[in-house]
Image (cartoon, rainbow, N blue to C red):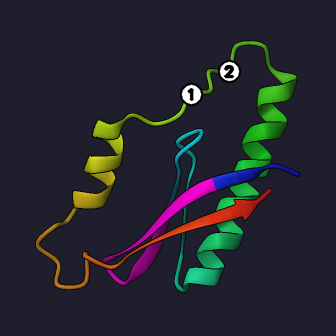
Amino acid sequence: MNFYTVVIRKSSGYWVALCLENGVVGQGKTQEDTVNKIKEAIESFQSVYESEPNIYKSPISIEELHEFLLVEEKEQDSEIYELRKVYA
């Protein structure tokens, strides 16, 4: 089990998570639901990455993080962010 850095933000009534180490995303109605979804997505990605030789894995760039944080910037609640470490 590895630990990953995940940024969670609220967007259009949902919580969206982005894994900084590999760019995997997850979404849920609550923060905990979102964390569970991102864990599942990371585990699934890791499984495919280990079995397929042509899968590219790279940390996201600062530009991609900036874009993730500023999407739908005009929403009133879009400035709610949380940084977590998750084990998957």
Q: Which mark is residue 58?
A: 1
Expressed as whole percent of the image width and height from the top left, the position of residue 85 reads: 65, 63
Note whether 45 is above or below 81 in the view shown: above
Q: Which residues are magenta?
A: 5-17
Circle 2 residue: 55
Residue sitting at x 75%, y 53%: 3
Q: Is residue 1 left or right of residue 88?
A: right
Q: Identify the amino acid type marked 1.
A: Ser
Expressed as whole percent of the image width and height from the top left, the position of residue 76 reads: 17, 84
Q: Is residue 9 on the magenta stretch?
A: yes
The quarter of the displayed image where residue 6 is located:
bottom right
Quadrant position of the C terminus in the picture = bottom right
Circle 2 residues within 10 Å: few <14, some 14–19, many ≥20: few
Residue sitting at x 56%, y 28%: 58
Q: Is residue 67 left or right of residue 35?
A: left
Q: Which type of secondary structure does the marked residue at label 1 adopt? A: loop
Q: Is residue 69 left or right of residue 36?
A: left
Circle 1 residues within 10 Å: few <14, some 14–19, many ≥20: few
Task: Please identify the dominant SS of the magenta region.
Answer: strand
Residue sitting at x 87%, y 24%: 51
Note whether 61 is above or below 68 in the view shown: above
The quarter of the displayed image where residue 63 is located:
top left
Q: Identify the amino acid type marked 2.
A: Ile
Report the Cα–Cα distance between label 2 and label 1: 10 Å
Q: Is residue 2 on the magenta stretch?
A: no
- 62 or 71: nearer the viewer: 62
Q: Which type of secondary structure does the marked residue at label 2 adopt? A: loop
Nearer mark to the viewer, of 2 and 1: 1
